[in-house]
Image (cartoon, rainbow, N blue to C red):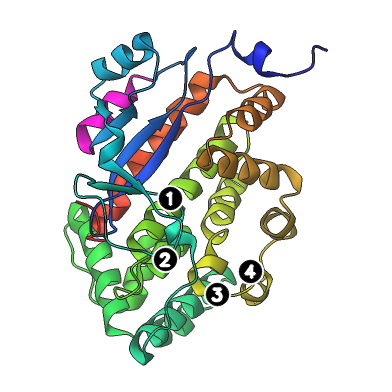
Amino acid sequence: MVPFDLAHMSNLATPLFLKLLADRQGKPGGLLFCGSGGLALPVELRELAGRVPSFYGQSLPAQVAAALSELGLHAMPAAVLQRNDRPFEPLRQAKAGWIEGDWPLQAPPSPNGAQAASRATALLLVQLAANDADTHEIEEVLRRDPTLSYHLLKLVNSLAVGVGRKITSFSQAILILGRQQLRRWLNLVLFAASSEDVRSPMLLARVAVRARAMELLAHETGQGKQVQEQAFMAGMFSLLGVLFGMPLDELLAPLKLGDATVQALLSKSGELGELLAMVEAAEHGDMLAVARQLEALQLPALDFNRLVVEANLWMLNVTSEAGQHG
């Protein structure tokens, strides 16, 4: 077998990377294309560019830039972009309008009592749902947090419009939503729980892309529904330590997750761990690592690129519903 290297990769369609950008207020507002030549650009990229400002760097080859422009992306002057890897700071450059960098991954601010209680309640609900607790146990916790209760009923009522009825109780809501969707909703709510944490909008967007990309990768590699759900959960919980500013293993212990999910999260081992490592490599623009893993999975770059776009489209829906996009 020919060793995998950049020369080999240059003859292939290469992975597409989309870097999430924050606007001046630190909220998700744009996407920056990161890549080079030999790209397989999915047509779905046009839909994404039509929904959110999407850019590419001015240093790209003319042919690639032209193809991206045709799909609705725009060239971004360097002066418009400011990098920040420290805790959030307002834009310093007068011309800058977008912020890139890992500032959302920095330590969380100290929450006030109400914020801490809300996030703790959300985590408790995640634990109960993950452990298939009885509905009445989940109801009892929901009654303690009017905000979470309101958003749950609002969500389920919107889903129930098609069946011609309104949902007025938590037990009805949980029944209509279903346990799998309840777990998914609670996971997302957990990251959006603190309006005072400046990181929350970008963390929610990042974790939404990561979790959905993991789920789609599991599907593309032939895994069944159960593994796909585990992949989504692994992607979602992978940033739980960042959210709380605590060791991830301590946060995972009460959730009683399956061994494959825990191994993926704590040691990047197993099939789920390899997928998580690839998604994280994509977030850092490590083209060689991603391309090597795609070859090992026998997954064409075009399929990977399509699911990257789909994961970002799903993220836009999530952040829009959370009132945090745009």
Q: Is residue 6 magenta?
A: no
Residue 84 or 168: which is nearer the viewer? 84
Q: Determine which of the numbered discs, if any, sits on residue 101 in the image.
A: 1
> Given the image, on which type of amino acid does mark 2 rest?
Pro
Find the distance from the CA under tag 1 to the CA under tag 4: 22 Å
The residue at the point 53 percent across, 61 percent down is 239
Mark 3 or mark 4: whose residue is earlier in sequence: 3
User: Is 44 displayed left or right of 122 in the figure?
Assistant: left
- Tell which tag, 1 or 4, sits nearer the viewer: 1
Mark 4 or mark 2: whose residue is earlier in sequence: 2
Residue 326 is situated, as x and y percent measured from the top left of the image, at: 19, 51
Mark 1 or mark 4: whose residue is earlier in sequence: 1
| Residue 293 vertical position relative to residue 43 in the rendered view, above or below | below
User: Is 202 displayed left or right of 92 in the figure?
Assistant: right
Mark 4 sits on what residue? 248
Residue 303 is situated, as x and y percent measured from the top left of the image, at: 50, 23
Q: What stretch of residues is rendered in magenta?
A: 42-52
The residue at the point 56 percent across, 36 percent down is 217
- Tell which tag, 3 or 4, sits nearer the viewer: 4
Q: Secondary structure at mark 4?
A: helix
Find the distance from the CA under tag 1 to the CA under tag 2: 10 Å
> Given the image, on which type of amino acid does mark 4 rest?
Leu
* Residue 18 placement: quadrant: top left
Mark 1 or mark 2: whose residue is earlier in sequence: 2
* Residue 64 placement: quadrant: top left
| Residue 139 vertical position relative to residue 98 in the rendered view, above or below | below
Mark 2 sits on what residue? 87
Q: Main secondary structure of the magenta part?
A: helix
